[in-house]
Image (cartoon, rainbow, N blue to C red):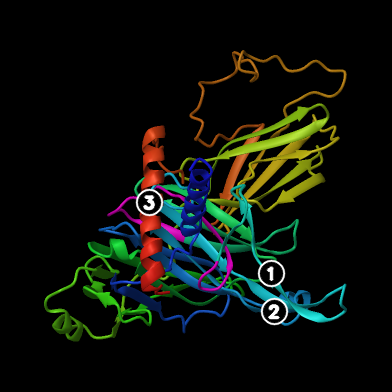
Amino acid sequence: MKTIFPRIVAALTVLALMLCAAPMNSSAAGEMAYNMYTSPDMSKTGKVHTTYMIDFRAPQSVYGTYWALANFGMDFSKETMKAFKGIKLGGGYAGLQHYNGHGCLTERLGILSFWHWEYQAKNETTGKTEWVELNASQMWPDRVDDPFGGEGTGVQSIHDYAWQPNQWYTMVLHTWEDVENDSTFAGLWFLDQESGKWELNTYYDTHLVNSGWTGDMGLFMENFMSSRREGVREYNVKNMYVLDKESKEWSSIEKVTLSYGDGGYANKVGTHEYGYNEEEGYFWGITDGTMREDQAEHDKAWSAQKTYTTNQPKTPTFGTLSTAEMKAEMKDGDLVVSWTAGETSTPQIGAKVEIIDEDGKVVATKEMTRPEVTSMTLADLDAAEYNCRLTVTDIFGQTVVTEKAIDGYQQGEEPTPSGEDGEPAPSEEDGEPTDENESVASEEESVTTSGQGGEEPDQKIGFFEAIGTFFANIFESIAEFFKNLFVGSEE
């Protein structure tokens, strides 16, 4: 018994991990709530987009629900087809979930998934041309790529985003060309409209070149756990926009078709209602997987689909890019430039540092396109008497420029006296201290902005509560597994 017990524990652990790693839009056999679909009319937009935006709210939420707020493809540009002969497949989706798998500590999650591509390449060993799999690579946060299977294979990012029911959020998908890798990066951001704070959820190197979003960006709401089919789950969406890659102009997506479906499986039960709220300008859908006594009558009462048109601004509102603080300091012969964003600033996508001499000539420059990077170092730079100009760009193309004298001293000179905190000691000429988020213009520093005018709440979970939740999920997953073993799987 002593030798068998550890094996049983190990087997159950592996089983639980396999179940937790299953694709989030897969459903077990058994009765399920209906799927709800939103199909945007993209006929008046360009074919390739760099940016996609949508506002989302879940007035009511049930565990085991996925709100896919965009289903997309990736463009195969001439550069991509040259780099990857015969490339095909791919695509992905992004959105929010009410679920706590994948090692997450909360039941509120963000997700971005990419199905793999395939291309032809010569096998150096056999000399034959073979199909090679290409997957996107996660760049942030630092974690191993999370593969998935079931409905195709690929990689995905699923982790905590503490969104709340009955509150509006903006989701943004954005692509850009990375200056270091010469490939297309793709990222996911969320804006908490109540707090005004943006949060980077994840971003990937797609390995494609000069690419962007394609497809109809369709949406769906899905109950992916048969054991959690009952209960009202709802979605509201509005303010859908795309930014054309070629023209750099925004298109307003005003017409959508709402529908419900069974995903090809005749096991859906309960309500499946949808419509358009004219007063507040949003599209909505509601399901409840509870079997109805009048199920047949309810199914007949709701048509398979209906098209609605909204009246929304022609261009989106997305806030202002701001830099709360910038430092340019000489340290051991290197120039270290760092900055922080304003608390409600739009998300940065890149930055450029320029060193300017007394004649206004740029003598050194460095650029990066990484949304999480907030400092750069220019090595072996004797630039104590120069100015430093920092240009930050956000995901919407807005820029903010900050220029100031470099703090430091040339070799052989004494350092500037400093206070206890390491900052220059105040003098009688110094005025009253200003708020750290306030833009200040002086002889040493000037700030200009051009273009149009999130952190998630702290969430602390006790150790024993987290452990309890972990094992509860394992046993529930095990029960689902053995149930599916005999009944079969749906998707």
At numbered mark 1, what does the secondary structure look like: helix, strand or loop?
A: strand
Image coords of residue 310 (percent x, y) = 31, 75
317 horizontally vs 112: left or right: left
CA separation in Å, label 2 and label 3: 42 Å
Which is nearer the N-term, disc 2 or disc 1? 2
Pick whichever, 336 or 168, lies toward us: 168
Q: Residue at x 21, y 73 (%)?
A: 270
Q: Which residue is drawn at 55% across and 34% down?
A: 440
Which is nearer the N-term, disc 3 or disc 1? 1
| Residue stretch in magenta | 149-171
Labelled pair 2, 3 in contact (Cβ < 8 Å): no
Labelled pair 3, 1 in contact (Cβ < 8 Å): no
Q: Mark 2 points at which residue?
A: 87
Identity, as a three-letter code, of the amino acid under mark 2: Ile
CA separation in Å, label 3 and label 1: 35 Å
Labelled pair 2, 1 in contact (Cβ < 8 Å): yes
Q: Name the residue under label 3.
A: 475
- Whether residue 223 appears in magenta in the rendering, the answer is no
Assess disc 3: are there few (<14), some (14-19) or many (≥20) residues with their C-alpha within 10 Å of its C-alpha: some
